[in-house]
Amino acid sequence: MTMTNNESVDMGEQGSVDKSRFLVKLTGVIAGGMFIDGYILGIIGTVIGGLALDLGMSLFWEGLIGASALIGIFVGGPLGGWLADKLGRKPLFTIDLAIFTIGSVLQFFVDSAWQLFLVRLLMGIAIGADYSVGWPLLAEFAPARLRGRLMAMNEVAWYLGFMSAFVAGFLMTSVWSLDWRIVLGSSTIPAVILLLARLGMPESPRWLMNQGRTEEATEIAHAYLEDPSDVLDVTHEPTRKGTFGMLFSPAYRRATIFISVFWFCVVAPYFAIATFAASVLSDYGLGDGLVGALGVNGLALVGVVVSVLLIERIGRRKLTIPQQWVCAAVLAVIGLWSSAPPALVLIGFLLFAFANAMCTALTGVYPGEIFPTEIRGVGTGFATAFSRVGAGLGTFLLPWSMHNLGSGTTMLIAAGICVVGASVSQVLAPETMGRSLSETSAPHRR
């Protein structure tokens, strides 16, 4: 439900809203969605071997289960974004978490490969919708001077979730010997906490203004936005309807092509390598690979934290382009140097993880800034879906590629993907640091 006018006026006049505290809470509940996304995508890698044996799964089903949540995100991203643009950010912000929680609980009861696939597909749909609601919502409330940093912090939460999944999965499987259903269903705990924390959040003032609900938008803007210039910028929000086709219009197709290709090429090699990090590193002579896997994901977390600290100092482009070239070079060396010492291979994977994470921090920042309010949700959702094609293909095909093509060829393919992303970003990536949303989402007709 949208806040009533009287409630909005009371909040503004009585000063009952602590704007800084609200911004911290909003960032936290959005980052929480990223945490559970990272958690469910990481936790499957810790039990995939055991559940494959238990359910008698083929390599096909093993890859499909690993990619199931990513396939769901592919569906949920555009669908959730379209609904968020049409119905508002606030309703979807709670509904998607409720759906995710239901799916998480269902994991306790699955007893076949196809049931697990459907349940994790449902959870992925909910997460995809959350991407398309959370990032636009934060972009529309965050002050320009902090917008990039706050949005990039969501990636910190994602990596924390991914890392937590590896640690929790190890404890639950190797130390406590719990059933894989309990391991997967453990995502219910953070989901319930997050669902409760999201209750009562306000609607986006920019979305309200875009819908012609000027009085409500103005009241919420005054009550919640920290910077007076951002309040003024909201009043300049045009009243117009968005369509999916606008993403490919002359005004916005450069933005759509850039963020979609960039995101695809950043996550495809990372998801493939990180999801099966233990087995990949084992193929290179690094024992069972668990320590190396934790190192790869841990250094990725450091990389995204570095981007959070630098994004409002050096800008977006400097954190987007060079790092992709580094990733391409590192993976090419690993692919070509088949006789490299295991220690050097590990260093290479660590460097890849660090550089990849630095530019990954921008994947959630750019969509919220370069798309206008009327297509910010569906634009974010489309880019999310396109990226998950890459992530899903990488996760699904990596076991097959390592087995049939070999590790060297697999790494060279990953390096080629990084080259494509770096080249597109070099040409199309904009600089949006410190600019209002009205400026960053202005149409481009080149």
Image (cartoon, rainbow, N blue to C red):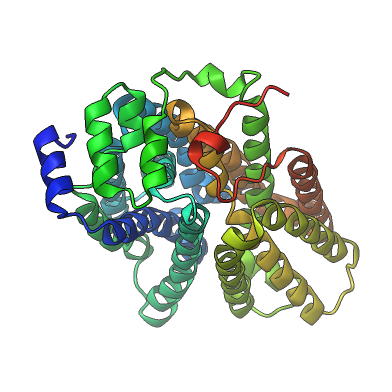
User: As rendered, which of 195 and 4 lies closer to the eye?
Assistant: 4
User: As rendered, which of 345 and 284 lies closer to the eye?
Assistant: 345
| Residue shown at 32% from the left, 22% from the top | 211
Image coords of residue 117 (percent x, y): 43, 44
Residue 98 in sight from this viewpoint: no
Q: Quadrant of residue 281?
A: bottom right
Q: Quadrant of residue 287?
A: bottom right
- How many labels, in total? 0
Q: Is residue 179 above or below residue 110?
A: below
Q: Quadrant of the N terminus?
A: top left
Image coords of residue 225 (percent x, y): 32, 48
Q: Quadrant of residue 234?
A: top left
| Residue shown at 77% from the left, 71% from the top | 348
User: As rendered, which of 377 and 211 lies closer to the eye?
Assistant: 211
Residue 307 in sight from this viewpoint: yes
Q: Quadrant of the C terminus?
A: top right
| Residue shown at 43% from the left, 26% from the top | 374
User: As rendered, which of 24 and 72 lies closer to the eye?
Assistant: 24
Looking at the image, residue 390 sits to the left or right of residue 238; the answer is: right
Image coords of residue 269 (percent x, y): 68, 53
Q: Is residue 207 above or below residue 369?
A: above
Q: Is residue 126 above or below residue 177?
A: above
Image coords of residue 442 (percent x, y): 57, 30
